[in-house]
Each structure stands twice: as structure tokens, then as C-alpha cells.
Image (cartoon, rainbow, N blue to C red):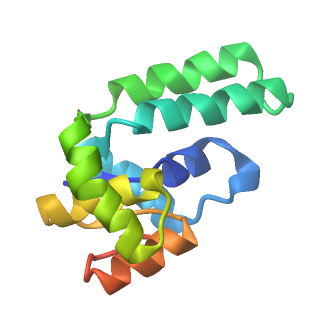
């Protein structure tokens, strides 16, 4: 099991996001196991797909195909309560100088003791500082 950032998922579907061997190997790993994501993950992925559609990077049928594929993957979405946001995620964001959104991934990895898959440079830097194993 590992924490999966939206940046890695998007790289699987858009050529200009440059999926490398490591990112693609995570897709294979995911098919054999499962990933956990914070509650904002479906919104982040949906927003990227919507923006891609609006910019003409993908057709509507392509968006629905990606959504269908992602729906079939073993991805567990963790709810984010007000308590979790205010008492756990916010302090992580402050300590590591991350957005609240990125901090939600790091907090989840720390709390669950799981490795993190991300392409985001700031999140990678924070994960290293927090001694979280990086998969990408």
C-alpha cells in the first residue's frame, strides 16, 4: 500500500506530463495491491480532467474513459474531517511550507507510515524531511 498523489495519476494519461518508468511501474504495483489517497484526490483529478477538456487536450469520451479506468483501480479514499484538517493537516502545511492540499498527502503518509508517490517537487522535499519513502 502507498499514498498516491494526483500528479502521478495524471502523468499516466497525458503524454506531455511525461510518465517515466517509475510512474508506470506504480500503475502495475497498484493493480497488484492498492493505494490510499486523501479526500481531496477525486476533486483534484476531476479538476485536471475538466481543465484538460476545456483546453482541448482531451475529448469528453477520453475524460470518461480515464474516470472509468480510475474507478476500477483499488484506490481507498480517506475522508478528511474538520478535526483532521485543523489539527493534523494544517500543522503539517505550516511546518513543511506546503499548501493544505499537498500537506494532506504528507499527513496521510506519516499517519499511516506509508511511502508516497508524487511528482511534486515541494511535496518530495517535505517527504524527505519527514523521512517518508518516495516511490517516484
Residue at x 46% of width, y 69% of height: 123
Residue at x 41% of width, y 37% of height: 40
Q: Position of residue 120 (x, y in %)?
A: 54, 65
Q: Does residue 62 appear left or right of residue 125 in this picture?
A: right
15 to 106, vertically: above or below: above
Q: Position of residue 36 (x, y in %)?
A: 25, 45
Q: Quadrant of residue 110?
A: bottom left
Q: Which residue lies most toward the right here?
A: 56
Q: Nearer the viewer, residue 19 or 91?
A: 91
Would residue 34 be visible to someone looking at this image?
Answer: no
Q: Position of residue 31 (x, y in %)?
A: 29, 42
Q: Quadrant of the C terminus?
A: bottom left
80 to 1, vertically: above or below: above
Q: Position of residue 5 (x, y in %)?
A: 43, 53
Q: How many marks?
A: 0
Q: Nearer the viewer, residue 135 or 47?
A: 47
Q: Does residue 129 appear left or right of residue 7 in this picture?
A: left
Would residue 83 be visible to someone looking at this image?
Answer: yes
Q: Quadrant of residue 93?
A: bottom left
Amino acid at each position: 500500500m502507498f499514498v498516491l498523489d494526483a500528479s502521478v495519476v495524471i502523468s499516466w494519461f497525458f503524454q506531455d506530463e511525461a510518465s517515466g518508468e517509475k510512474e508506470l511501474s506504480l500503475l502495475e504495483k497498484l493493480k497488484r495491491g492498492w493505494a490510499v489517497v486523501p479526500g481531496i484526490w477525486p476533486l483534484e483529478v476531476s479538476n485536471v480532467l475538466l481543465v484538460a477538456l476545456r483546453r482541448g487536450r482531451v475529448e469528453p469520451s477520453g475524460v470518461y474513459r480515464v474516470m472509468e479506468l480510475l474507478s476500477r483501480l483499488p484506490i481507498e479514499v480517506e475522508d478528511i474531517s474538520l478535526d483532521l484538517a485543523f489539527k493534523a493537516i494544517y500543522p503539517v502545511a505550516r511546518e513543511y511550507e506546503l499548501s493544505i492540499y499537498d500537506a494532506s498527502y504528507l499527513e496521510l503518509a506519516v499517519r499511516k507510515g506509508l511511502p508516497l508517490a508524487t511528482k511534486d517537487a515541494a511535496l518530495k522535499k517535505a517527504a524527505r524531511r519527514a523521512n517518508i519513502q518516495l516511490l517516484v
